[in-house]
Amino acid sequence: MDFSFNDNEQSFHDELNDFLDKELPADWYTKPVRWPHDYAGSPYRDPKDEETGEVFRKKLADKGWLTISWPKEYGGRGYTNMEQAIFDERMSYYLAPASGGISCGIVGPMLLRIGTPEQQEHWIPRIASGEIGFWLGYSEPNAGSDLGSVSTFAREEGDHFVFNGQKCWSSGAHHADYSWMIVRTDADARKHAGCSLFIVDNKTPGITMRPVINILGNHSFNEVFMDDARVPKENLIGEKNKGFYHLMQALDFERISLVGIGTFKRFLEELVEYVKTSTRNGRPLKDIPSVRHKLADLATRVEIGYMLFYRTAEMLDRGQEPNVESSALKVMATELARDMAEIAMEILGPYGQLTEPGERAPLRALVSRGFLESISATIGAGTSEIQRNVIAQRGLGLPRV
Ligand SMILES: Cc1cc2nc3c(=O)[nH]c(=O)nc-3n(C[C@H](O)[C@H](O)[C@H](O)COP(=O)(O)OP(=O)(O)OC[C@H]3O[C@@H](n4cnc5c(N)ncnc54)[C@H](O)[C@@H]3O)c2cc1C
């Protein structure tokens, strides 16, 4: 088995490095306040960095790099999924503001698969240019892991579906323009059979949002209520009552596109550097066997994460659906994010608990944030238990229990 990039891939990798070195300040990776595989976006401490990030993102959109694996006629570059993976890895390693997020990582690829030509023509260019943003309207108070239990109901009325119900844990809904939403469209069908997928405009009369504050004290979640919200029929995506099956594919994309694999390597390098240059009670950290072993474990797991990540891209290029593999990648990466935070906290000792950057707060005070936040990644986009169920059932052929 050959693990090296082919010539095209290697030259794209080098082109990306040159671009990133030229377009971002050398210390850019210190700017975003981000933990590996975080869900809370990339806030910056200095608003000027936000502006630099926006300019950079626009340059990527102009080059068609936010959607590089999409067909050229839809604003993409027609690159392979492996090249997309190389792009994601390099951007996340530099902590570049590059993610097309839910729009380019989930909604766009799904529209290209199951949207009508009219829907593709309407939505895809606006997604590719970064003009519109989406949030995911899946979870409800009584439907999380078991998404087939959604009870928000859409009844047909003339040219519209009329929505009534509630979504919760809606990350970033307040910053987005549209929702990619699953609702029930057949009250009598078996639960998984009666659901459909829609694009819903946030501005639709009858939709209201209430903020929900996360573990870090930030407004990242929302509750979203729909009271007789009228959604045009042309916003039904895919087949009516087949939404649950479409959604399973969308979740695979989510598990791959949100991973930010390069952030793990970057943070590990920073932690190793800290260990090489710091002491605990007068003793160099680099000489302490337990510290060395923990770093060795992290390095091994980062390497496994990279293998799984590139494997999903390779499967997509071969026309295979990386379903079990995307679950394996998700559970592997999110639990690594959590363990990395715990190990960093042990290595830094009390200094790891500081929340504001400064002389005494190593690694820009990121560890306290990661320690709190990393738990959420093992829950969002399907919990670790659900990923293990997928691997056991579909990967190992064990019976459903
Ligand atoms: C940071 C974050 C961001 C999120 N963003 C969004 C978003 O943007 N949009 C959205 O729709 N949702 C979002 N969610 C919600 C998320 O998808 C759900 O929290 C998740 O699917 C779990 O559902 P639940 O909270 O209802 O827990 P439950 O499904 O009630 O699960 C409770 C516990 O039981 C376990 N469990 C449940 N079923 C099984 C089973 N069959 N086998 C073994 N164990 C099981 C679970 O693993 C969990 O430990 C987000 C969640 C988080 C933490």
Image (cartoon, rainbow, N blue to C red):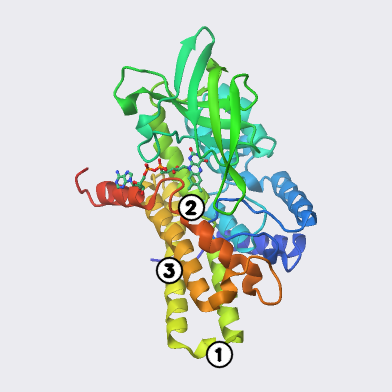
Q: Position of residue 138 (x, y in %)?
A: 46, 34
Count neighbours of disc 1 (C-alpha within 10 A) and say few if under 14, some if 14 to 19, many if 20 or more: few
Query: In the rendered view, would you say 184 is above or below 2?
Result: above
Tag 1 residue: 281
Q: Nearer the viewer, residue 9 or 393?
A: 393
Which of label 3 and label 2 is nearer to you?
A: 2
Image quadrant occupied by the C terminus = top left
Residue type at mark 3 is: Arg
Residue type at mark 1 is: Asn
Q: Position of residue 235 (x, y in %)?
A: 54, 21
Instruction: Give whichever of discs 3 and 2 has the lower sequence position.
Output: 3
- Quadrant in the picture for residue 177: top right
Identify the residue shown where x is 65% and y is 33%: 125
Q: Position of residue 398 (x, y in %)?
A: 20, 49
Identify the residue shown where x is 45% and y is 72%: 298
Instruction: Give whichever of discs 3 and 1 has the lower sequence position.
Output: 1
Tag 2 residue: 376
Query: In the rendered view, would you say 45 is above or below 267?
Result: above
Would you say the residues marked 2 and 1 are in contact, meaning their CB atoms lie under 8 Å apart?
no
Query: In the rendered view, would you say 32 is above or below 380?
Result: below
Tag 3 residue: 301
Give the CA distance from mark 3 to mark 1.
Answer: 29 Å
Q: Residue furthest top?
A: 158
Count neighbours of disc 2 (C-alpha within 10 A) and say few if under 14, some if 14 to 19, many if 20 or more: some
Which of label 3 and label 1 is nearer to you?
A: 1
Q: Is mark 2 within 8 Å of ligand 1?
A: yes
